[in-house]
Structures are given as C-alpha cells and as structure tokens.
C-alpha cells in the first residue's frame, strides 16, 4: 500500500497558467492536489489586468480539489484588496 502524496497550494485566484499543472499532477497515481484560492477574480468577469471583461472559456477549477476561502464576513472575495495603510 502506497501513501498518497498530498500537495496543497494557496493562490490568489485560479489562472490559466497553473490550473493545467494542478489537473495533470492530480491525475498522477499517488498524488492528490488541493488548491485554496483567496478570491474568485476573473472567474466571472474576465481578467481586468488583460483588459478583458469575458470569463475564461477553459475549465480552471476542474480535475482537482479546490476551495475558495472566505473573508471574515463569510463571503468569497471578488478580488484581492491590498491595505497599504498598515505597511511601514
């Protein structure tokens, strides 16, 4: 009996660059991938950094376990808000 190698990753949001990697790794025997996302940016409204308002037309969250983490309010964040007022 082999032990399963469990890989957990924390990312800001699902991306077209990393999702295929998590999917392929999760297909490997003895590997289990879980991705934890801080927000669902670009899942519904496109990638604002690329000037797009269309969501991705590829599956960025299928084929591996993933979870969108919730804010203190119990909601999934639309984007990452950076608070510069607390930085020195």
Image (cartoon, rainbow, N blue to C red):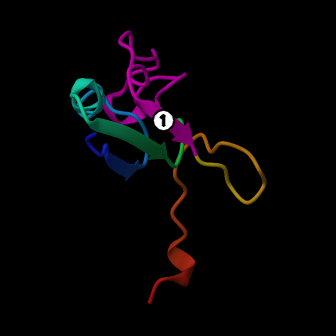
Position of 86 relative to 27 (above/below): below
Q: Main secondary structure of the magenta part?
A: loop
Count of number-bearing discs: 1
Q: Position of residue 9 (x, y in %)?
A: 36, 50
Residue labelled with disc 1: 66
Which of these two is toward me, 39 or 83?
Answer: 39
Which residue in the rendered view is the most extreme toward the front?
1
In the picture provided, is 56 more to the left or to the right than 5? Answer: right
Point 32% across, 48% down: residue: 7
Which of these two is toward me, 19 or 54?
Answer: 19
Position of 38 relative to 1 (above/below): below
Numbered range of the magenta stretch: 41-68
Point 45% across, 15% down: residue: 54
Point 40% across, 34% down: residue: 14
- Tell me the quarter of the image containing the C terminus: bottom left
Classify mark 1: helix, strand or loop.
strand
Does 73 appear in magenta?
no
Residue 83 lies in quadrant? bottom right
In the picture provided, is 75 more to the left or to the right than 14? Answer: right
Q: Position of residue 19 (x, y in %)?
A: 30, 29
Q: Position of residue 49 (x, y in %)?
A: 35, 36
Which residue in the rendered view is the most extreme toward the top?
57
């Amino acid at each position: 009996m082999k032990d399963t190698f469990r890989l957990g990753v924390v990312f800001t949001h699902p991306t077209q660059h990393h999702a295929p990697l998590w999917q392929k790794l999760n297909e490997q025997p003895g590997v289990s991938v879980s991705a934890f996302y801080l927000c669902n940016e670009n899942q519904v409204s496109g990638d604002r950094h690329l000037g797009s308002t269309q969501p991705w037309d590829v599956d960025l969250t299928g084929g591996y376990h993933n979870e969108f983490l919730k804010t203190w309010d119990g909601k999934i964040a639309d984007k990452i808000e950076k608070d510069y007022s607390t930085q020195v």
